[in-house]
Structures are given as C-alpha cells and as structure tokens.
Amino acid sequence: MTLVGAMQLAVVLPAAASLPIAVTGRSPNLREAVTLSTAVVVLLLVASAVPGVLAGERPEITLMEFVPGLSLMFRLEPLGMIFALVASFLWLVTSIYSIGYMRGHHEENQTRFYACFAVAIASALGVAFAGNMLTLFVAYEVLSISTYPLVTHSGTEEAKRAGRVYLGILLGTSIGFQLLAILWTWNLTGTLDFEAGGILAGHADGPAAALLLALYVFGIGKAAVMPFHRWLPAAMVAPTPVSALLHAVAVVKSGVFAILKVCVYLFGLDFLTSTGASDWLLYFAGATILLGSLVAMRKDNLKARLAYSTISQLSYIVAGALLASSLAATGAAMHIAMHAFGKITLFFCAGAIMVAAHKTEISEMDGLGRAMPFTFVAFFIGSLSIIGLPPTGGTWSKFYLALGSLESGQIWMLVVLMVSSMLNIAYLLPLPVRAFMAKPSTDLPDKITEAPLPCLIAIGVTSLGCLALFFYPDLLYQLASLVGAGAG
Amino acid sequence: MTVLHLYNYEIAIFLAMVGFYVVVSRGNLVKKVAGLSMFQTSVFILYISMGVVDGGTVPILVEGMTHYSNPVPHVLILTAIVVGVATTAVALSLIIRIKEAYGTVEEDEIHEQDKSF
Amino acid sequence: MAHAFLDNLPALQVVIPLLSAPLCLVLARWPRLVWTMCTLVTWTAFGIALALLQTVLAEGPVSYAMGGWAAPWGIEYRIDAVNAYVALIVTGIAAVVLPYAYRSVPLYIHGERVPLFYALLMLCFTGLLGMTVTGDAFNVFVFLEISSLSMYGLISQGRDRRSLTASFQYLVMGTIGGTFVLIGIGFLYVLTGTLNMADLAARLPDVTQVRTLHTAFAFIVVGIGLKLAMFPLHLWLPNAYAYAPSTATVFIASTATKVAVYILLRFVYTIMGPALFSEGIPYGQIAIVLAVMGLLTGSFVAIFQQNIKRMLAYSSIAQIGYILLGIGFASVLGLQAALLHLFNHALMKGALFMAVGCFVYRLGSMSIEDMAGVGRRMPWTFAAFVMGGLSLIGVPLTVGFVSKWYLVLAALQKGYWPLAVLILIGSLLAVVYIWRVVETAWFAKPSLRAAEVREAPLAMLIPTWILVLANIYFGVNTTMTVGVADLAARTLMESMR
C-alpha cells in the first residue's frame, strides 16, 4: 500500500469504526473486538510508513479545497510520524486496558465511551498528519469536541462542571487566540503550509512575531501552558483510560505537537532566534514547569497529582520548541514519546489501584505494594522515566533538552530543568516507596489482589516500553533529529 | 416664496408627524392603527402631489392638449392605497383577537396581564 | 413548450407560488392535498432557482420583461449572481420547511384552518421571492408588503396569546418601515423619473440635488433596517420569533431577514452606491458601529433568556450584526463574508429552530428549565441541536466556521484588529448560551414533562437533519458557496465603480 493510502486510511478507519462500535453495543465482546482489531490495523498502517519517512519520503495528499488556495491536506513528516506512532501504539494498549478497567469498574454507557474514543483517536491522527495549519486546527477542534462526552462520562454534577471548564478553556483559547493567529498568518503570508525553515520569515517584524507566537502558544490550550492549564486537572473526572490515553497522550500531546509544528515549520527556528520572539514566552514555560511540579507535590489525589505533573512536563516540550535550537527541538520531539510512555504507565497504575483497591488518595496507599507488587513496580519504572533517570527513556529526552538550553545560551532553563527533576523525585518516588515500606493502614481491606489481567498486560507493555526506549532509542532519535534539523 | 411653493410637502410632513405621534403616544391599539393610517396617507399625498406638472391637465388623450400631469405616481399610489387598506384590515382583525384574548385593547393593561402570565 | 418554460423562468419563480396561495383556499376541503401542492410548489421553485443560478453563472445576468413591456417602462425582473444566490437560499429553506410543516402545523392550528395557514405561507414565500428577483424599485415595496402582511398573519397563529401582541407590534413597526421605504423610493423617483433599478443606477450619479438623495438613502436604510432587525431597530424580532408557530419561525428566521439584507445591498451598492459614496460620509463606519452593538447586545441578552426561542431570536440579532459588519467593510472580501453568512446563517438557524420546534412539539413548552433531561429522551433531536449550535459557534467542519473565517479575514485585510477580536468574542458568547441549553438538556434530572416524552416524529426529524447535514456539507465543501458569494460580491462592488 502506498504511504498516502496508509495515511488516509489510518485517519478514516478509527472514525469509521465508531459506527460498528455503536451498532455492536449490545454485545460487549463483539464491540471490543471491533475496537481492538481497528487499533491493530491502524498501528500496522502507521508503522508501515516509518521506513519511507526515514528514507526521506514526504507523502502528501490534498483532501479538499477549503477556500481558494487553501486546502485540507495531509502531509507526513518525521514529527507527525513520532506522534502518530505513539498515539496509535498506545491506543492499542489502552484498548486492552479499558476492557479490564471499564468492566472491573462497572461503568455505564461503555458503547458511547468506545465510540467517542475512536473518533478522538482519528482526530489525534489527523493532527499528526496535518499538512497545514488549517487542517491541524480542524482536527484539533474535532478532538476537543469528541472528548467532551468522555470527560463528562459519569454525568454527575462534578463532571458537568469539569466539562464546562474543559470545553470553555479549550474552545475559548482556540477560537479566541489560535484562530486569530491562523488568520493573521494567512493574511500575512498567503499560505498556511508547514514548510521546512518556516513561512513567516520576512513577513513579520520582531514585536509582531512575538505577539503572533504568543497567540499561538496560548491559543493552543491543549499544551496547558499556565495560565490556561485548569482544564487538565478538571478533565480528571473522566474514567482512567481517558485520562491515560487522552490526557497524558493524545489530547495534550496534540497541543505540544502543534506548538512544535508552529515553531519549527511556521516560524522556523532561525527566524525565532533572529527575532527573539520566543524569549519572553520561555518564562511562561519555565514558570509552568516549576509551578506545575510544586502544585503536584501538594495534591493528595493521585490522578490530580499526575495531572499537574503532566502540566509541568508538557512545558518541557513547549520550552524545547521555544528554545529554538535544533538540539532542543530534537529533545522536545523525543519527549513527546518518552513522556507518553512514562505518564500512561503511571495513569494505568492509578486506574489499577482504583479498580483493585478502590483507593484514589495517595495517603491511603501505604503498604499497598505488598498486595499489588506488579503495579507498584511498574509505577516505579514510570516515575523514573518521568524524572529522567536511567535506565528509562526519559533520560534521553531530558538530556537533549538540557543540551538545547546550553546551545541557545539559556542557562537558567537548565537550572529550571534540574530543579524540576528534583521536584519530580519528591512527588513521585515516595508513593512506590511507601507502598512497599510503610506499614499498611488498619482500615485496608484484607483481600486486595492485582487488577484484572487486561490491565496488567497493558501496564506491563508500557513500563517495558519505558525501559526499551532507554536501550533502543535509535529510531526515535533518527526521526527526532530530522525534526531538529528542520528537515520537514 | 419657496416656502409656500413647497406647501404640498409641508402638508405631507405635517400629516406624517401627526400620525407618527399618535402611534407612539397612544396606548389604545385602535388609536394606534388610526395614527398608522394617517401616516401612510400622508405618503399618498406626497406621491400624488409630485405628479403635478405646472399647467398640465388630467392625463387623458384629448385633441389639442399636449401638456399633461404625470400619471405614473398616481398609478403607483393606487397600489400603496391597497396596501394601506390591507394593513388596516389586518391590524383591526388582530385587535379583535387581542380583545378576545385579553379583554382589553389598552397597551398598558395588556402588559399588566402578561406579566402575571 | 420546454423552451417557453425556460424563457419564462424568472416570472415563474414568482408566479407559481403566487397562484398556489388562492389554490390553497380552493382546495381547502382537502388539507393533505393543500400540503402536497405547497410542497411541490416549493420544490419546483427550488428547481427554478437552481436553474436560474446555473444560467446566471454560465451566461451572466438574466433580464425578463414582465408582460413584454421593455424596461425602463415596464417592470423588469433582473437576475444576477446576487439575487440568484438569495433566491436559492429562500427556496431551499422553503423546500425543507414544507415537509416539516406537515406534523408541526397541526400542533398550532386546528383542522379546517390549516389550509389558510399554507395560503399565508405561500403568500409570504411569493413576497420574499418577488423582492429577490425584481429589478424594479417600486415592485420591491409591493412585494415587501405582500410578505409583511402575510408574515403578521403567520406570527399571530401561535398558541400563546402573546403571539397576537407580538404580531401587532411587528405590524406597527413593519408598516412604518415599509412606508419609509416607500418615501425613499418616491424621492428617488422625483430625482430621476424612473423606477427601474438599472436605470436608477445609471441616472443617479448625474443628480445635482444631493441632499434629496441623502434623504432618500436615510429613509430607505431605516425602513429596511426595521425589516432586517438592524440594531437598534430590532425590538419586534424576539417576540415575533418566540411566539410564532414553529414552522413560521423557521421560515421567517431563515429567509425574511436574509431577503431584507439583500434589498439593503441592492439599494446601497447597486442603486445608490456610485452616487453616494463619492461624498465621503462614513456610511461604512456607521454600519460597523451598529453591527458591533447588535452583535454584542444580541449575544449578551441571549445568555440570560429563559425561553429558548427568544434566546435563538436574540442570537439572530447578533448574527445579523455579523452580516452588517461584512457589508460595512465595503470590500469584496467583506461582502463575500456577508453573503456567505447570509447563506450559512439560514442553514444554522433553520436547523436550530427546527430542532427547537421538535422539542416544543413533544414538550409543549419553550422554557429552558422544562427542557431538563430531554436530551436523553430525544437523542436525535438533541444531536441536531448540538450540531446546529456548533455551527453557530463556528467550529471547523461546519458552515459557521467558513463565515467566521472570511469575516475575520476581511477585518484583518482592512486592518480592523479590534473587530477581528470582537467577532471571535461573539463566537465565545455563542458557546455560553448554546452550552447552557446543552447542559440542561443532557445533564439535569428530567423534569416531569421531559420524563414522558418520546423522540420527535420522523416527518420533523428528517427535514431537521437535512439542514444539519447541509451545515456540515457546506462547511466542508465550500466550492459552491464561496464561488457564488465571490462572484456576487464582485458584481456588487463593480457597480460602485
């Protein structure tokens, strides 16, 4: 199959699958078979494109003309490849996990859940393959809306409020800032294509470029740069697989992915450096990294803590984009994958604890490690990856981000990264340590076992992934360095 | 001189303003309709008078006459008169229905009732 | 025969609906037959509008001498890209409204009076089409009154007695508006001695009495402004939309204001533009100020409405603000945006009012409170409402996004930064008032009323979903709308030179 065909099919298939999923709702086994088989096919389709992309092919296809001279189009390049690979692989893993979780947790409306999930993945892949900013924006908005029913899944008053914050911030920033920025770009340059070296150079002067970049960075609310981060903790009312895949991987990563795309392919790293447009935004990213970590330390609810950790980690990638050096961009691109594997492992573990022991607060988890050793070991591995310690994948991305800060002469960014790593240790590691070492609290029920098997399989896969990415980062590095070199 | 010369316009404007004032100031719906009719009628006069040609006669083809008034505005205004009649008819029938529904045709009393509705 | 038919298309566009109105009364004993006939008439009219648009696109403007009397003495029907496009909107909406009416109308009107309702609807349809296709200024007034008078009748048929007062209020304001237009046209006639639009456009630039011309302009703009609910002349609109029968609301909301906008465009750009705009009076800026005020007040007031139809009505006032904004930019791009939104707003408001009509049909109430939990009982209607709402907000892949895209672009092109921001803020306000309904209808515990309802009848759902799908189709495939709107905008701007 041609690359173009694979790319199109990878987007269309999950969206189309939502229909058979909805139809087979009466029979859960059939429904989940549809989900799993679609996920496998999509993963194979995406993976089949890797050799071509590495060999320098950049397949593109125009879907339809939106306005004269501006089309909805897909174009596959290394950064999109990374994101698509991560998203489609983790979708498969999450689907397996969901089966155990949703059944173990006796959730209602599971059919709606799986159908919306498939649409969300389709739009995440649409973001990954987007060939111009318009296509990216369209997929971005579809993603916001298709995940709304997932966030409000439980239908409670709390879910309703969370949904309001979620949609309010995501739609508000994207319509209020991002769309304005896109139209401004289009007005300035007459194109929205992602091109190597950027399209804006020569069309905007320093202050205008800085304002435009700010509109993009804050307009892409999914990147959760403070002060537009509140939607992410709010979205944690969703079932855990949603938090895991969407709010650690697909949704948030499409945000930082979009920022990377904007910096690398719209502005161009050289243009950013020469105008210094990104310098002041870097402070926002730095502040988000530290504040996110600090808030995370104070959260007792595990999912809330992970959410603030995500906010902090996302800004690593944003900072990597804004540093505007090729090493930092490489690191940022790698961090998309590294953080995805680490954070999804942590969320899976959180969900497993919730299903098996019905615990959501960290202070209640003392001593749980003896009952659920597998889960907590996995949690430990995931934590290491987030912190950036060997032998986990997170080491590499942090390494390149640090090199990137040095390359662009922003020493203070290096300090921020290091301080944040310390904070990560402080808020993540106590949990597995206390789970194994501390005395169980008395009210712990006697018969706690590990979570259902599908959950454990998924946890095993992602935590092994964290380790594997340390020993075999070559593929990822090759793709990422192509991004860093701006070789769209 | 010019002021008197344009007296037809002044009459039309005066009538229009009287009609308009009645529409705005009266609370009785029937009186409002009367004002509205007056307002429309003033425009009829405006149109009819604009067709006058100095020294012209009635626009009927007669031997020896070459100087006619302009008949077009008259024809136009026939249509407008029909519209005016129709409007008044619709308005009055609405008032009858309002009287049935509210038991009054005074605007303030109707508002009073709808508040508690 | 076929040839004769094709040659007379411009006349048939108006005459067929006109003849169907009395036929409704003749056939009054068989209400179903009346409905079938009216449906066929609207479909035929839609076909004619399509054919006319194709002819115009292929061969340029079509001129038709009514009764064989050549312009400028006789009445000319003149169809170019602009009004062919508007006629397509009007007939298209009518063609969807009629099937919807079949189940919806009997809710408001009893048995033997149903044919009378259809007669009024057809008259209104005739009037709107007449205004659209005619090339004669006085003819515009006549058709304006035909549509208005029938509209007063349609509005007064609501179940709530407030429909009567709403109708009366509209009658008073509408008549004043219509009379203003009449005065304005009279002045134009005094100045030029002609009523033919093309002839007027040719003669007006030579007129020396500029003050009279400006007076005529003022009367016409205020008169039409009343009809299209331009801020601050919008006071009649919320009650009229809210208390009219659902079918009438859908039809009026999606077509009547659109045709009024078209008439405004015709008078301001084609007829008076060349003569007026050389004067240097900032009409564009005045329009922009009024548009922005309408946009903001409409959106804000909509947020606080308890009655869902009133909420959508205030939203219409805001949307009319968008259209006026595009007109006020006085650029090809701005006009294109305005014309696009004309079409797109008809689609989204049509879909929304239809969905609301479905809710009202089952619930018997228009209050948002009573809609609590109804979304789960009527999922298809609810989904249609959400899609229409997303389109109103301007989410990508819907028509609303296309409008917003062009409107913001037009603002940026002119360098009006704050306006670009305002347009987007308007979108966000739409999120607020649409989502208030979505949350109530989906999350709240079902009210007593809502717990017992079923999904709306198919005869109402299918037309609703046709419009919803049109919202998506024209939001994705914009070739047709953007192309025609571009051509129409150029046609209008060309006459300015």
Image (cartoon, coloured by chain):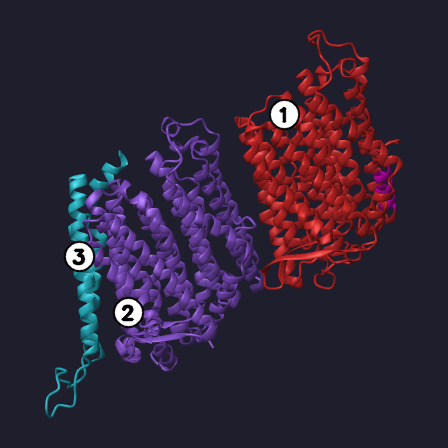
Chain colours: A red, B cyan, C purple
Q: Given this view, does label 1 or label 3 mark the residue nearer the observer?
A: 1
Badge 2 and badge 1 both on one subunit? no
Report the chain holding disc 2.
C
Residue interval drawn in magenta: A396-406
Residue at disc 3, secondary structure? helix
Q: How many marks?
A: 3
Residue that badge 3 annotates? B88
Q: Position of residue C47 (x, y in %)?
A: 38, 62
Quadrant hosting residue C201 = bottom left
Category of crowding for the residue at label 2, using alpha-carbon neighbours closer than 10 angstroms: few (below 14), some (14–19), many (at least 20): many
The chain letter for the residue carrying disc 1 is A
Instruction: Report if the CB atoms under discs 2 and 1 are less than 8 Å apart.
Output: no
Q: Residue at x 74, y 28 (%)?
A: A458
C-alpha distance separating marks 2 and 1: 67 Å
Visible residue check, residue B11: no
Specify the quadrant that holds the C terminus of chain A.
bottom right
Using the rendered view, name the quadrant where residue A99 is placed.
top right
Above or below C89: residue A483: above
- Measure the alpha-carbon separation of dots 1 and 3: 68 Å
Q: Position of residue C241 (x, y in %)?
A: 33, 47
Left or right: residue A152 versus residue A444 is left
Closer mark to the observer between disc 2 and disc 1: 1
Q: Secondary structure at mark 2?
A: helix
Give the residue type that dot 3 points to.
Thr
The three-letter amino acid code for the residue at tag 1 is Met
Residue located at (35% from left, 55% from top): C233
A256 w.r.t. C65: above or below = above
Q: Give the mark toward the camera: 3 or 2.
A: 2
Return the residue nearer the eye: C139 or A40.
Answer: A40
Q: Which residue is mark 2?
A: C139
Q: Which mark is residue A102?
A: 1
